Amino acid sequence: MNWDDPTDATAPERLVGASADREDQAVEAALRPKDLGEFIGQEKVREQLDLVLRAARARGATADHVLLSGAPGLGKTTLSMIIAAEMGAPIRITSGPAIQHAGDLAAILSSLQEGEVLFLDEIHRMSRPAEEMLYMAMEDFRVDVIVGKGPGATAIPLELPPFTLVGATTRAGLLPPPLRDRFGFTAHMEFYEPAELERVIHRSANLLDVEIHADGAAEIAGRSRGTPRIANRLLRRVRDYAQVKADGFITREIAAAALAVYEVDARGLDRLDRGVLEALLKLFGGGPVGLSTLAVAVGEERETVEEVAEPFLVREGLLARTPRGRVATPAAWTHLGLTPPRSATAGNGQQDLFGT
């Protein structure tokens, strides 16, 4: 199960989760920038993509196939729509898990118009037969449709109009090299800096007709885990609080009070994140401790701890994965206001060569 996959209906709902629920999808549709000039952040990707699209328009050709990789919520879907808008082409949206057979992909490809953009989200989760069909479609703009079965089966070549495939993936390492090599432009989406998220929040607040002070935007940005989707979600929750508890104007104090109600702390940790750290620190002295043991102590499934809580804790430098188990860093003790034992400050609980 991929907890970060927006197509996974079983993913838990978390205020700081990067997957998109139906409310997020509805709001994002209204907040999405329409062109590269409006798109905030990802400066290198925007500059490179702008050159690719301008050159294609100058040649009067379709744009090269584009692969976008990175964590959920960073703007891959938005960029795919911008690519279509910049090229003046329609866009077709589907996802890897929805294409389970080669026939599913053949039906989509055969209905594409010339120059159309096909956005394939979570492309790494597409079935292998469909993936192999996509190789030929991307390179030669044709597919072979198999008619019949067994020795009497016949391959009928089907010519396709030139199109642009935009693939998005949260796990680029799972893409086979033959597929990855067929993309003319590959970009990796980075997490946003707080200053960039502040700009995202101000833009979204303006579109949502929400009054927000600069320090209020900074407070929300600092708790948004470097992800615009989370920033917009926190903005909506703070807006609700400000309308009910205050005069609707968001200041730093209002934002902090609102997010305290929703249990999102100053570094963006929620109840689950803090529960993992507290168990690691208070019950196991900072570790090392095995993942299964830690999950039992928290009262969560092993996969939930490993795939939902740990990635952000590791990225924030609060937890380390070692061969001996999970280990808390000195920053984790500081964040929770606890005093680390001597072993934690002298090597994160790992013994030296003499076992001292």
Image (cartoon, rainbow, N blue to C red):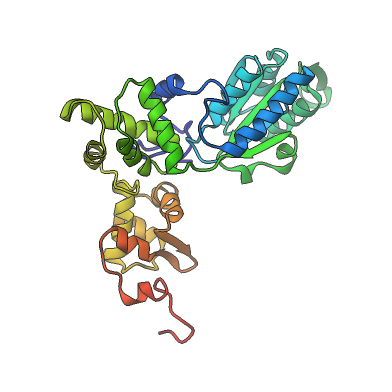
Q: Is residue 298 above or below residue 51?
A: below
Q: Nearer the viewer, residue 261 or 281?
A: 261
| Residue 341 visible to an observer of this rendering | yes
Residue 115 position by quadrant: top right
Q: Residue furthest left?
A: 245
Q: Nearer the viewer, residue 221 or 286?
A: 221
| Residue 83, image x, y percentages | 62, 23
* In-image side of 319 versus 282 (left or right): right
- The residue positioned 36% from the left and 76% from the top of the image is 343
* In-image side of 212 versus 160 (left or right): left
| Residue 147 visible to an observer of this rendering | no
Figure disc tally: 0
Residue 296 position by quadrant: bottom left
Q: Quadrant of the C terminus?
A: bottom left
Q: Nearer the viewer, residue 66 or 226?
A: 226
- The residue positioned 61% from the left and 25% from the top of the image is 119
| Residue 237, image x, y percentages | 28, 31
| Residue 301, image x, y percentages | 37, 49
- The residue positioned 58% from the left and 23% from the top of the image is 82
Q: Is residue 176 above or below residue 91?
A: below
Q: Residue furthest front?
A: 214
- The residue positioned 64% from the left and 28% from the top of the image is 166
Q: Is residue 287 above or below residue 72?
A: below
Q: Nearer the viewer, residue 195 or 316?
A: 195
| Residue 6, image x, y percentages | 47, 32
